[in-house]
Image (tube, rainbow, N blue to C red):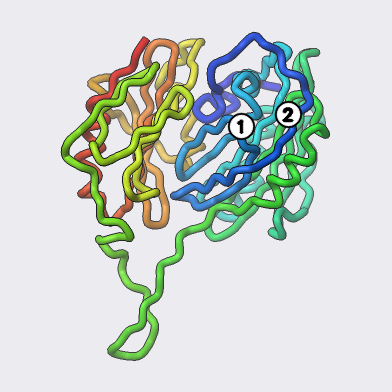
């Protein structure tokens, strides 16, 4: 198995949170309740155990880890005695022809004979799915086992992956619950309105106004966290999320999220950006500036929402700042977002 973070294409979304030397037992803690995560842009949804760590790239991916310690183990494939589980949802715009390509990419990473099993046809929550099982022995330091389910629906290829470092069967009950809840990405449907001149039903153009008309305030506050500081609109809420934060206003599809990932090896920003293209539909990033420092930005989004993901490295950290907004109100959100990006200051 090729274990480079760049080869795995996982440095952005699975690079993990802070590591710890404590060893985790393979058996999971008892799960008494579940939460549901719904992506505001790609519209996929999935249940996950309450208390698990969550890391998201709006419009593209969501990851859930059984605990913070095991997150880094999944990103490096060097568990150092740590055991635990991961749930991943990944959505890309495309059709069924994309599935074989994504499976081939998986085989390029897990190269040992038999590491990636032959695809099987199955169902997930009643939907047709292609299942691929794969795994590897991590140099006498635990078994990595994963099942990836590809679903093609409404212009998207979405996969749900359940993975374990340790004993996969220990998480069977949890993973069964996750699969029963899963809904793949879908393009938002436009609402139909009656045409009073003909009596027919017509689909209107996307309105500039929206469900909520509460644009970002011109007045700014300052958020100061452990890894960065940033200005944000006074009528937005700032919520810490791991080492990052989420800044949200009245609209659920219009917010700014800062994710922070370790970059202990000091991988060059350009290489990280190049390896991350797959997470943004193969789109290329363009040079940008974040807080006066060199950065790159990816465009993303679908349906009625538009987004930008800014990549910047500082010290031994990678910052990904995702901005999303209701497309018809871009002129209301862009000035505030530009202020936020310009004000960003990494710490440490």
- Please identify the quadrant where the N terminus is shown: top right
Residue 246's tag is none
Residue 280 in percent (x, y) is at 46, 40
Circle 2 SS class: loop
Relative to 97, residue 293 above or below: above
Q: Residue at x 79, y 49 (%)?
A: 120
**Where's residue 96, x and y in %?**
62, 54
> Residue placed at 37% from the left, 56% from the top?
304
Which residue, given by chain and number where applicable, does mark 1 sit on?
52
Q: Give the residue at x 64% y 48%.
A: 99
Residue at 38% in and 49% down:
253
Task: Note whether 193 is above or below 249 in the view shown.
Answer: below
Q: Which residue is mark 2?
A: 29
Left or right: 28 in relation to 2? right
Earlier residue among tags 1 and 2: 2
Q: CA distance from mark 1 to mark 2?
A: 10 Å
Residue 54 shown left or right of residue 259 in the figure: right
Q: Residue furthest front?
A: 32
Most extreme residue toward the bottom is: 198
Q: Is residue 289 visible?
A: no
């Amino acid at each position: 198995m090729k274990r480079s973070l760049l080869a795995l294409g996982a440095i952005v979304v699975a690079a993990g949170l802070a590591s710890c030397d404590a060893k985790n037992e393979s058996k999971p803690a008892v799960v008494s309740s579940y939460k549901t995560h719904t992506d505001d842009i790609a519209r996929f949804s999935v249940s996950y155990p309450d208390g698990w760590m969550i890391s998201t790239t709006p419009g593209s991916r969501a990851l859930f880890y059984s605990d913070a310690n095991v997150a880094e183990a999944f990103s490096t494939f060097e568990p150092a005695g740590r055991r635990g589980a991961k749930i991943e949802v990944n959505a890309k715009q495309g059709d069924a022809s994309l599935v074989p390509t994504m499976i081939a990419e998986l085989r390029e990473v897990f190269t040992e004979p038999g590491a990636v099993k032959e695809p099987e046809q199955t169902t997930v929550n009643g939907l047709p799915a292609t299942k691929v099982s794969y795994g590897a022995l991590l140099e006498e330091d635990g078994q990595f086992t994963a099942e990836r389910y590809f679903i093609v629906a409404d212009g998207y290829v979405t996969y749900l992956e359940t993975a374990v470092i340790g004993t996969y069967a220990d998480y069977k009950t949890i993973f069964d619950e996750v699969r029963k809840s899963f809904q793949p990405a879908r393009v938002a449907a436009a609402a139909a309105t009656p045409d009073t001149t003909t009596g027919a039903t017509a689909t209107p153009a996307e309105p500039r106004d929206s469900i909520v008309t509460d644009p970002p305030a011109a007045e700014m506050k300052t958020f100061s966290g452990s890894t960065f500081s940033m200005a944000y609109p006074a009528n937005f809420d700032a919520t810490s999320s791991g080492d990052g934060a989420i800044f949200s206003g009245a609209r659920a599809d219009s917010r700014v999220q800062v994710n922070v990932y370790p970059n202990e090896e000091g991988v060059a920003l350009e290489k990280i950006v190049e390896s991350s293209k797959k997470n943004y539909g193969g789109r290329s990033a363009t040079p940008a500036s974040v807080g006066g420092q060199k950065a790159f930005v990816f465009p993303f989004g679908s349906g009625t929402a538009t987004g930008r993901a800014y990549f910047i490295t500082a010290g031994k950290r990678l910052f990904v700042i995702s901005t999303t907004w209701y497309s018809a109100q871009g002129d209301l959100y862009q000035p505030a977002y530009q202020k936020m990006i310009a004000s960003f200051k990494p710490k440490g």
